[in-house]
Image: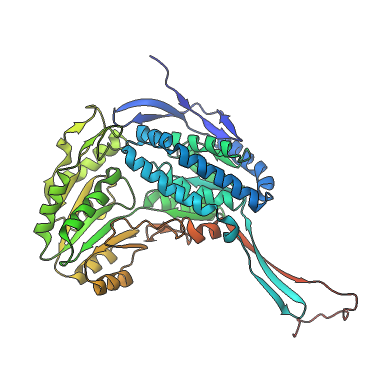
Amino acid sequence: MMSLPVIDHFVGGSQFVGESTRFGDVYDPALGTVQKQVRLATTADVDYAVKAAAGAFPAWRDTSLAKRVQVVFAFRELLNARKQELAEIITAEHGKVLSDALGEITRGQEVVEFACGLPAQLTGDFSLNASTEVDVYSMKQPLGVVGIISPFNFPAMVPMWFFPVAIAAGNTVVVKPSEKDPSASMWVAELWREAGLPDGVFNVVHGDKESVDALLDHPVVQSISFVGSTPIARYVYEKGAQAGKRVQALGGAKNHMLVLPDADIDLVADSAVNAGFGSAGERCMAISVVVAVDPIGDELVDAIVKKMSAITVGDGRRSCDMGPLVTREHRDKVAGYLDIAAADGATVVVDGRGVSVDGEADGFWLGPSLVDDVPTSSKVYQEEIFGPVLSIVRVKTYQEGLELINSGAFGNGTAVFTNDGGAARKFVDEVEVGMVGVNVPIPVPVAYFSFGGWKHSLFGDSRAHGAEGFRFFTRQKVVTSRWLDPSHGGLNLGFPQN
């Protein structure tokens, strides 16, 4: 049997093997076969990467803002010119179609472009003569070594929510990508080197819980940025906070689309299908519940079914609309929710388990699935499925729909579809969710705003990218300054009076 290629770590500007003898399998989800292995870091391996980042920090911290801009901008230019390469890597390991992979990179590139404006984001404040001949000013300084733990569903975009801002602010970075699709981070590391980033500023270690805990426990790591499921986000937040770190931990979601009777049904159906089944539903901003206000339920279900029939499922490297799920285990778990739905009294309108695919039979396939009249007591409604299963819940009034959304444990994203501006404005004001779309099904903010939800969708006070990103990756220092002339008035042990 031929040995498989091994993905090692990237530390201090080069490939790093480390001491680990543990490996994880990296699949091609469209083929259902193991294509590579990834080396899983030990605690000692993580320590080596953190020390490399710590060694690079003083020089990078002291690098001028002008030079940092040049490096970040060079990275942006290289990424833009070669993003097709990265998209192909993502499709091969995650399974999403190439167009979706390119879209992911484009959204991540927006954060890189925002980070190019770092001089404006790192300015302080100045007060002249706050007291007589006393000036007060503030400055923003980097934290030091920061850790980023990212999920499998967006192996390029999610890390790019964090590391461009962290690097622009003068920090050094250790990224722990998902072991399911680790190659994207390695490609990014090489691109940073080509862009002129000094060795040790950007490092990658692969692994599982051991490497996560090593980052959370390491005394040199100053902050942790995490995206993943709510139980793990809570764990990361609590463990990191106990270790004295800054933590931004973005958790799970159960995103609702509230459809009012005056909405354009064709637009709603398109939006529900696009938001529910893009990236095979493996995204925290997917619409997983459509809340239909009477009397439009039947008409809306019929329209969604019609749109779903046009979706082609298959290998993302071919001309398909939706690819496979990331692993067989995850595919089976998601498919199991269709049995739960039927047992709980819901109607499985479209069952994706028998989908015809343009791909190999052993791929991790599950077609778009639609479940109507889902009881809110069902796990299908309550849990984040993270796959191509769209639920329909019917309500009698706007108020009932709003209360349904607000009563949930999550508060990541939501949307309202209506042609009534007053109703939309009321929903935006009253809904208890962090990111809201009005006739927009996936309200992911642009890079100069910040990304993050409410309730169990976000642990910690800081969101990703935008102005909050720069605040998270810097700490403020306030200086009170007086330059005395030779004729100062001698000792005065009291507070200045003017």
Nearest the eye: 377 or 289: 289
Instruction: Choose between 4 and 48: the one closer to the eye.
Output: 4
- Residue at 58% x, 51% y is 168
Is residue 17 toward the left or the right of residue 87 in the image?
right
Q: Residue furthest top?
A: 1
Whether residue 412 appears in this view of the structure is: yes
**Farthest right residue?**
486
Rendering colour mode? rainbow
Query: Is 95 placed above or below 254 here?
Result: above
Residue drawn at (36%, 45%), measured in percent from left and top?
Answer: 103
Give percent across and percent down for residue 131: 73, 80
Please report the residue visible at 25 percent of the width from the left and 55 percent of the height from the top. 382
Q: Position of residue 288 (x, y in %)?
A: 25, 53
Question: Which residue is at the front of the view, 176 or 235?
Answer: 176
Residue 219 in view, yes or no: no
Could you say where residue 50 lies in the image, as x and y percent from the top left? 60, 41
Quarter of the C terminus within the rendering: bottom right
Classify residue 479 by image quadrant.
bottom right
Decide if residue 434 is on the left or right side of residue 236. Answer: left
Q: Along the horizontal axis of the image, is 347 left or right of 151?
A: left
Q: How far across and how far down the image is residue 438, in percent? A: 29, 64
Q: Is residue 398 left or right of residue 112?
A: left
Q: Quadrant of the N terminus?
A: top left
User: Residue reaching furthest bottom?
Assistant: 497
- Is the residue 309 above or below the residue 357 in the image? below
The residue at 27%/32% (across/down) is 318
User: Quick check: 1 above or below 114?
Assistant: above
